[in-house]
Image (cartoon, rainbow, N blue to C red):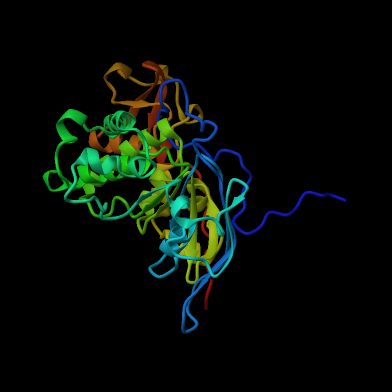
Amino acid sequence: MDATPALRQGDLPDEPAAPRTGSPPAGGPATASTGSAASITLEQIRKDYAGGTVAVEDLSLHVPAGELVVLIGPSGCGKSTVLRMINRLVEPTSGRILLDDEDVTTADPVQLRRRMGYVIQNVGLFPHQTIATNVGTVPRLLGWPTARIRERTEELLELVGLDPARYGPRYPNELSGGQRQRVGVARALAADPVVLLMDEPFSAVDPIARARLQDEFLRLQADVRKTIVLVTHDLDEAVRLGDRIAILSQGGRLEQYADPRTVLGEPSSPFVREFVGGDRAIRRLVVTPVTRDLLAPLATVEDAAGLPTIALGASLYDALAVLLTTNADVARVTDGGRAVGALSRHRLLSIDYPADVVDQRE
């Protein structure tokens, strides 16, 4: 008899999710070092409120160490409640929450929160403190020496793209919304937490700043490889950032838990299909890379040197944007600066995706 236990709701093997499209950092993707990230396992957690309201009903979910998991769903589905139960700002009614193999539902909640970074929508910086003092908040609470706090603060400000000498002495009201959000991320990382919780961290900034922050955050995650649980209402953000996406319905019910490409390409239910929308084929381009099997030989293309250029591994969405912006039918594809083939607009748009099942009604 096979002794392997069946996977519970929300369980996935501890193997890396499908990689995001785009070029990885130099030297290949970073991996989580020992002690820098912890897995999170939710075992049938439930949250009931007075009056019989069930915010989250028996949710089980496993987040592998070093991955970024996005919680998304309609308003009132319990996604922020789930996030706050992980650091016990909201106490679960029942169930267990494990960091690696440690049950933290009985741990000191204050000490637990000091092991986790927490980033919220409006940042929550202390307005009467300088940026440097804000970043060093948790290390001070942990009793770090002053010199170590200063060194860590400067390191993190540089990591999020803010010059410590320029921005460290300033106050939050002297920074833009995007800069304050970067400071919030730096503060959350200050004590090197094993988990980072983020509740709609980029929703309070304008679309241009949001896209830039998302790009910077992906680069940051490639460096630090923390276990991150991020709540958002923005499906495009979930697809862009997540290693895996957990789609919740009312009562915190887990409808689907998979990598973005699977969520968009193989919705598990009518609810998920409706939630991701009829334009999911366009969104699928964001998580589908340019691969060699899509390319034609350069020898078959006239004036290949004058064509617009796309990097091998870039998303099909970015490739289509280049073709449309330059009004070109073909682009030259390069790998490390070397031309490896050509991608045509016709080939890009003729990729065979699984079709939706059409409900035939009389």
Furthest-bottom residue in view?
51
Q: Quadrant of residue 308?
A: top left
Can the viewer see residue 357 in this picture? no
Total marks in image: 0
Q: Nearer the viewer, residue 77 or 131?
A: 131
Tell me the residue at 47%/79% (across/down). 53
In this view, the residue in front, 264 or 177, is 177
Left or right of 1? Residue 257 is: left
Query: Residue 281, percent across and down?
Result: 42, 51
The image shows residue 340 at horizontal and vertical percentages of 43, 19
Residue 233 in view of the camera = yes
| Position of 229 relative to 341 (above/below) | below
In front here: 30 or 34?
Answer: 34
Point 45% across, 65% down: residue? 90
Find residue 305 and report its horizontal and vertical position in percent. Answer: 30, 16
What x and y, as percent, mark residue 359?
Answer: 53, 69
Whether residue 24 is situated above or below residue 362 in the rendered picture: above
Name the one closer to the observer, 319 or 257: 257
